[in-house]
Each structure stands twice: as C-alpha cells, then as structure tokens.
Image (cartoon, rainbow, N blue to C red):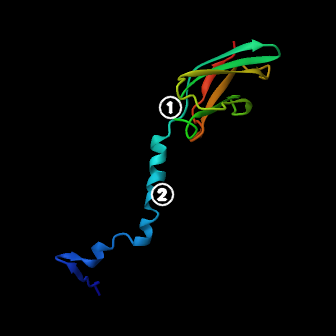
Amino acid sequence: MPRRLTRVSGDIPRAACQVLPMRHLAILPVFLTLLAAPAFADPARIVAAEAVPSGAGWRVSITLEHGDTGWDDYADGWRVELADGTVIDTRPLAHPHVNEQPFTRSLSGVAVPGDTGTVFIRARTSTTGWGETRHRLPLN
C-alpha cells in the first residue's frame, strides 16, 4: 500500500520537510570541515637540493617552499631516504618560516651506504605529514 503524505502547508508534503533529522545537523559543521581540509592543505615543495661529501658523511642542503601561516601550518622537516624508502636521516625544522620563503636548511654527517648513487628527499608539514612526492638527489 502506498505511503500517505500529509500536507504541512500549501502543496509541500510533510516527508519533504524531513530530509535531514535534526540530530544530524549537529555533526554537519564537523563533516564539512573534514571535507574542506584536503583542499586547503598544501605540501612543502622542494625547490633545490645539494649533497656534498663532508668528513665521514654527506652534507645535504635542501631549499623548501611552503605557505607557512604560523605554528598551525608550517614545513616542519625533511628527510633523506634510499630508493626503497629506508630513512637514513631526518632534519626537523623547529619553527615556522612565514616571512622567509623559500628557505634553505642543511644537515651534516648523513651516513649514506657506500654503494648508493642516489638518495631521495621527502618534505613534511605540520598539517599534512610526510609528502607523497620525493625529490631525486644524485650523489656526485
């Protein structure tokens, strides 16, 4: 038997007025925020990279660019990886660089296995974590 609709006012059926139960409206702002977050997230971009032999290891210098806005969203590190993803060293960045873009930071004493001809650099931000893209850095 078909469901009978009662009229609220005019020609609008009561069922049409109950599209979303009121209890679900409370979570709507949270849901919309979660949907919008990836759209505003911007990964740190590696602009330049250099590796120079130094003592018993390598001195790696990386230039990053990111839309740092302050402590809530900033490039907070980069790491040196082997081709298989093994992390061989990490350079944390202790504070935002809002007015210093792009910026370069170095890490000395990076112990790269002797048979390695290329390493990869991956950047991190405080909001998105480790980026998906890696920068290829040949060791000359």
Residue at 73%, 33% (x, y): give it.
86
Extreme-bottom residue of the structure = 1
Q: How far is disc 2 from disc 1 in space, using C-alphas? A: 24 Å
Q: Quadrant of residue 3?
A: bottom left
Q: Quadrant of residue 17?
A: bottom left
Q: Which residue is mark 2?
A: 30
Q: Which residue is mark 1?
A: 67
The answer to which of 42 and 114 lies nearer the viewer is 42
Tag 2: amino acid: Val
Crowding near the residue tagged with mark 2, few <14, some 14–19, many ≥20 C-alpha atoms within 10 Å: few
The image shows residue 62, relative to residue 69, as above or below, that is above
Tag 1: amino acid: Gly
- Assess whether mark 1 and mark 2 are in contact (beta carbons under 8 angstroms): no
Q: Would residue 101 appear left or right of 53 to someone viewing this image?
A: left
Q: Would residue 116 appear left or right of 14 to someone viewing this image?
A: right
> How many labels were placed on the picture?
2
Q: Which mark is residue 90?
A: none
Image quadrant for the C terminus? Answer: top right
Residue 111 position within the rendered picture, expressed as x and y whole percent measured from the top left? 79, 23
Residue 24 position within the rendered picture, expressed as x and y whole percent measured from the top left? 44, 68
Residue at 55%, 31% (x, y): give it.
44
